[in-house]
Image: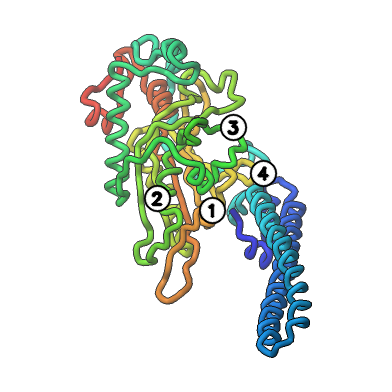
């Protein structure tokens, strides 16, 4: 969430930056300032009446001591009327504060100056590519047919026990998932990330803190009886470890990683793009999160991008890195890099990771601050990235590495899985 004071002090800049998201930024910002002006006016009037009421109370006391009861009673009547006005103004201030909060919740983060303009995925900026796209034989199969051929994934059984988007992995594919977890966590811990096992459900305050709530896209699974939410990513619990905390500047950056299942309703998903592992409601992912000093967060963002790139290179997959345009970025992000790998049998790029800097947007919601020397506490910056999401990585590995003998695993995964081929 943007700070109203920052909006007031940098109004033109905020409006200009938000235009990259293709929204009516001026109307949004002016409305926020209008509500805040009314709040400040109501607070000023309330404070003035409080001061008058306090002065009248002192006067009443002095008159009573002097024996002027009649005059004191007249002033006391005025004081009683003031108290009613003060009560009404205090209620008005609370209402305006709630209205301002609700309005600020609708304003997305301001894009960083390096974010390209654009309306959607076609306008994203390709930063670089790596790896080689394999040439597959004409009879090459997409991953869902390979899964059936080698008895690796049962999509129909998942539909039977739950519904579409909940596949059942078995045999060597189940073992490969376990191997992937260990491989990715090892890569992250070697890079200085501390491993955690967080809860898979979070409360409303946690969902609000990282910007998942209010849920504008209908992605969160809600447990109504307990007022809890299944996590869409471990970013939510990991970042909320530090909600309402004041950290020491010398402890930054704080680096966290976790493996969890992730749950997303993906409301409105349909068609060929959801075939097989392309889009699931439950999937496994290893996440990295950093809590950073504001002066270093963009340097750290580039370091996180390089880290994810190194992992994809170890897997031998053709990839490209995109800097998302303003119209394609997530609500809370100030700048995002997407990683896509090429799925040869489908002839398409599949997103497998997003690495984002949220600047102070999440930290403001969570009151996540740090203290430097004798200075006042400041909002920290938060960053996270997928390192990696499994389903589409597995789809690309299966399609790109298929052969007559089976699906040849990258050498690094052979070390963890204990076998060479999925077959």
**In front: 331, or 192?**
331
- Percent coordinates x, y for residue 32 in the rendering: 71, 56
Name which residue lies at 75% across and 62% down. 38
Query: How many angstroms separate mark 1 from mark 4 (CA)?
Result: 27 Å
Cα gap from disc 3 to disc 2, whole angstroms: 24 Å
Residue 236 placement: quadrant: top left
* Horizontal side of residue 84 vs 136, given as left or right: right
Of labels 4 and 2, earlier in sequence is 4
Spatial separation of the CA atoms under disc 1 and disc 2: 13 Å
Q: Give percent across and percent down for residue 46.
A: 71, 69
**Residue designated by label 4:** 118
Q: Which circle marks residue 138 in the picture?
A: none
The residue identified by callout 2 is 241
Give me the C-alpha separation between circle 4 and circle 2.
Answer: 34 Å
Judged from the image, the secondary structure of the residue bearing numbered disc 1 is helix
Please identify, in this view, whether the residue under mark 3 or under mark 4 is nearer the observer.
3
Crowd around label 2: few <14 · some 14–19 · many ≥20 (10 Å):
few
């Amino acid at each position: 969430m943007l700070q109203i004071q920052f909006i007031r002090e940098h109004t033109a800049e905020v409006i200009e930056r938000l235009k990259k998201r293709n929204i009516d930024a001026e109307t949004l910002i002016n409305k926020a300032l209008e509500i805040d002006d009314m709040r400040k006016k109501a607070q000023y009037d309330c404070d003035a009446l409080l001061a008058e009421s306090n002065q009248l109370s002192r006067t009443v006391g002095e008159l009573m001591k002097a024996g002027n009861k009649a005059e004191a009673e007249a002033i006391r009547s005025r004081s009683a009327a003031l108290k009613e006005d003060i009560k009404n103004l205090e209620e008005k201030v609370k209402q305006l504060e709630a209205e301002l909060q609700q309005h600020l919740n609708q304003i997305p983060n301001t894009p960083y100056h390096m974010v390209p303009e654009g309306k959607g995925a076609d306008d994203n900026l390709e930063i670089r590519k790596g790896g080689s796209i394999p040439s597959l034989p004409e009879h090459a199969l997409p991953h869902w047919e390979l899964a059936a051929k080698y008895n690796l994934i049962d999509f129909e059984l998942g539909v039977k026990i739950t519904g579409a988007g909940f596949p059942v992995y078995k045999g060597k594919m189940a073992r490969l998932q376990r191997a992937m977890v260990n491989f990715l966590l090892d890569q992250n811990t070697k890079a200085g990330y501390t491993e955690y096992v967080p809860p898979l459900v979070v409360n409303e305050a946690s969902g609000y803190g990282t910007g998942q709530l209010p849920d504008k896209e209908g992605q969160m699974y809600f447990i109504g009886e307990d007022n809890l939410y299944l996590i869409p990513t471990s970013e939510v619990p990991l970042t909320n470890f530090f909600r309402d905390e004041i950290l020491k500047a010398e402890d930054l950056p704080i680096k966290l990683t976790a493996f969890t299942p992730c749950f997303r309703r993906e409301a409105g998903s349909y068609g060929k793009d959801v075939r097989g592992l392309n889009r699931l409601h439950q999937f496994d992912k290893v996440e990295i999160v950093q809590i950073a000093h504001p002066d270093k967060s963009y340097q750290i963002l580039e370091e996180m991008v390089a880290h994810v790139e190194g992992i994809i290179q170890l897997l031998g997959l053709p990839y490209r890195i995109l800097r998302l345009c303003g119209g394609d970025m997530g609500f809370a992000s100030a700048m995002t890099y997407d990683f896509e790998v090429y799925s040869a049998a489908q002839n398409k790029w599949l997103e497998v990771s997003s690495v984002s800097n949220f600047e102070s947007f999440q930290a403001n919601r969570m009151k996540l601050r740090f203290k430097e020397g004798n200075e006042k506490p400041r909002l920290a910056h938060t960053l996270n990235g997928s390192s990696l999401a499994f389903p589409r990585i597995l789809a690309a590995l299966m399609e790109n590495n298929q052969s007559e003998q089976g699906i040849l695993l990258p050498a690094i995964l052979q070390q963890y899985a204990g076998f060479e081929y999925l077959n």
